[in-house]
Image: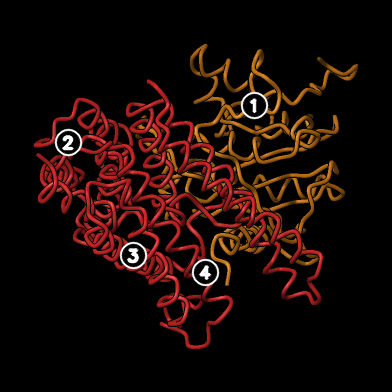
Amino acid sequence: MTINTTVLWVFGGIFLVLLVGTIAGAILSARAKNEESRRTIDNLNARTRSWWIMAIVIGTAVLLGQKAIILLFAFISFGALREFWTLTPSRRGDHRSLFLSFFVLLPAQYALLWVNWYSFYTVLIPVYAFLGLAAIATLSGETGDFLDRSARVQWGLMLCVYSISLAPALTTLKTGSDPILLLLYLVIVVQLSDVLQYVFGKLFGRHRFSPNISPSKTIEGLVGGGLSAILIGALLYPLTPFSPLQSAGMAAVIVVAGFFGGFVLSAVKRDLGVKDWGTLIEGHGGILDRVDSLTFSAPLLFHLTRYWFAT
Amino acid sequence: MRSPGGLPTDDRICPGSPSRSRAAPYRRRSVWSGAEPTTRQRIYFANHSSHFDTLAIIAALPPAIRARTRPVAALDYWGKTRMRRFIAVECLRSILINRTRTGEGDPLDPVREGLAAGSSILIFPEGTRGSGETIAPFRSGLYRLAEAFPDVELVPAYLDNLSRIMPKGSMLIVPITCTVHFGAPLAPFPDEDGKAFLERARLAVERLGKPA
């Protein structure tokens, strides 16, 4: 595959932003005065270091093409599902369902994506796994908390496998523009929205949005970060089949959905009594902490684009 | 590699596998609270719910400690077939013991020999794998070893998630992360009887799994 100049521009821009972030972090680190600000800046710099790695991983997959992207997201799903089930309780009677989630349904979902069997990969988990795993769970004979347990199994699959798989599914859409760029658009808008909400929150945050669920989210961060991410989304319209205005609208959908993705998963974490899903990504927590906003925004962007813009 | 005393000193999980192997299908993680990982002679005792329990603890121990720690395993299970014996004895350097007293001799004798030779020991005092939801009463061996070797530290360990990785009665592995929690050492009080000590030891393991 020839290297697309737009892709190079996009990654050039990402690396430039990361370079600025790295330099700013080094300056802040040298100027940190007290223990608390030092801790915040150390975490900021750890996050930036991790961003370099994540950008390089995504960049490599994009250069290698669609199949590499599908494989990368399959591994992201696997890691996320692992984190989900490490912290979510299950009983002996769920063992078979968990095994099937990891080793049958997850590979099947991405294999169907690989062969682009749209009408099957959109129903495999919401229909067949939903009914089938509940049926299989009855065979274990364990009825305690049956509805709770079935819901957890289904949530694990919907969040970590189905929703995440619809991000690489964007690359299968025929919209007249390069579909890989549309995936980059999603990833950039959703992740920038997270980053900008964090930055605006740290700089101007006064009013907590919901102390019960996510103590670090503030109204200032939310509005400032969200609006800037929508603006950047509008400016990135050349990556998409959308007009600038449509692109702003899609970015707004991504930002709002992404926010609630992070928010809902925070509520799940509070329910489970944990702060982070894992420890794999330094400064961020686990894989699921990083892709929580993607789990809500990817399905929406996929289905909206497919309905209105794909042929 | 074996030291002159016949005590294996390598930290391989399996012969031929790279040292510090991640041979287990999960990522090893350990938390030490109340005890430090040192090479001092110890009896580690833990809850038991999966075949991977021994591997999880062995993998969670730093290599220097791993090299001198030998798991105790049931002869009637791990000595039954050639394959099992290979895994238990050749790979993990287990001490195989009879779970029931048959004929003459104390089933714990091989463990005493191991301790006398300077090894640390890993033991599952429930005596069998449980459901993972509760910890069964401890059998008396732990108390008898504590009495016979007062200088050896008794360190409780709680294995989290192991029963969900591969529960008893299933060969299917679910690839989630497990954690080993090591706790503060404990020893029988001078006037404490065996039963009370064993219950206290059981509670020490249980509490590691439910931090306040």
Q: Residues within 10 Å of mark 1 (few under 14, many from 20)?
A: few
In percent of width and height, residue A166 lies at: 25, 44
Q: Which mark is residue A198?
A: 4
> Amino acid under label 2?
Lys
Which is more toward the observer, B210 or A295?
A295
Chain under callout 2: A
The residue at the point 49 percent across, 14 percent down is B81
Residue A286 placement (x, y as % from top left): 50, 52
Amino acid under disc 4: Tyr
**Chain B, which colour?**
orange
Q: How far, Cα to Cα, is label 4 from label 1?
A: 39 Å
Image-based side of A17 in relation to A310, left or right: right
Query: In this figure, which residue is indicated by the disc labeled 3?
Result: A255
- Left or right: residue A53 versus residue B93 is left
Q: Of helix, strand and loop, which one carries label 1?
A: loop
For label 3, the SS is helix
How far apart marks 1 and 3 lie (CA) works out to 43 Å
| Label ID, residue A174 | 2
Q: Can marks 1 and 2 be said to lie on one chain?
A: no
Whether the residues at callouts 1 and 3 have beta carbons within 8 Å, the answer is no
Farthest residue, direction bottom: A207
What residue is pinned by disc 1?
Answer: B21
Tag 3, which chain? Answer: A
Where is residue B86? Give x, y as percent.
Answer: 58, 15
Do labels 3 and 2 touch, CB within 8 Å? no
Sequence-earlier tag: 3 or 2: 2
Q: Nearer the viewer, residue A201 or B9?
A: A201
Q: Earlier in the sequence, mark 4 or mark 3?
A: 4
Q: Secondary structure at mark 4?
A: helix
Quadrant containing the C terminus of chain B in the rendered view = bottom right
| Same chain, labels 4 and 1 | no
